[in-house]
Image: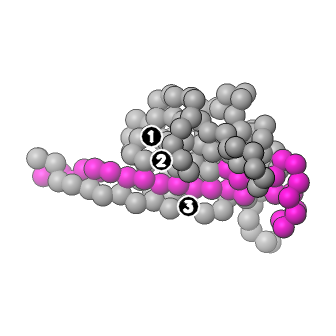
Amino acid sequence: MACGGSQTSTTSPSAAAPQPASSGASLVRSPCVLDAGGGKSSGHRDPDGGAGLASASCWFGAECFVTPGQTKAGDGFVGVSCEDTACQCEWRTPGSEPPIRTSFTLEAVPGDSDTCRRLLVERCMVGMRIESSDAG
């Protein structure tokens, strides 16, 4: 996901904050399945000998389609990506419409896909329907 956005707020990674009415939830309206994510981090030793987190990034995405393989209005993708404490939600459709992006800032560096998955749900998918990817 590219950098950019119009919203800036500061929260801890576990705090939920609803998106504004102009969020991409109006662009992508189909039920979503949380898809995949990843994360990486690098650390260093503090002067007092303790370990510290120097840099981290993570991402997580969801696919939102009424019928897989058939694109309908309201279908699309939702994702979150974080570089250190700077994060971004992105909503996009399979067509040529430009994606909608909002940015927010965290107090702590997330650095793992589990945290990014939670941020996707709590920050980017407020009010959206999430379905289980389990087949039974």
Residue 17's spot in the image, x, y percent?
59, 32
Give the SS element for disc 2. strand
Left or right for 93, reference 61? right
Residue type beneath disc 2: Cys
Q: Which residue bears the numbered disc 1?
A: 86
Relative to 86, residue 59 above or below: below
Give the SS element for disc 1. strand
Q: Let me know if residue 75 is in the magenta part.
A: yes
Q: CA distance from mark 3 to mark 1?
A: 17 Å
Would you call the spot at circle 1 few (<14 residues within 10 Å), some (14-19), or many (20 or more)? many
Residue type beneath disc 3: Gly
Residue 66's spot in the image, x, y percent?
87, 57
Give the SS element for disc 3. strand
> Seen from this angle, which residue lies furthest bottom?
136
Q: Which residue bears the numbered disc 3?
A: 37
Mark 3 against mark 1, which lies toward the viewer? Answer: 1
Contact between marks 2 and 1 (CB within 8 A): the answer is yes
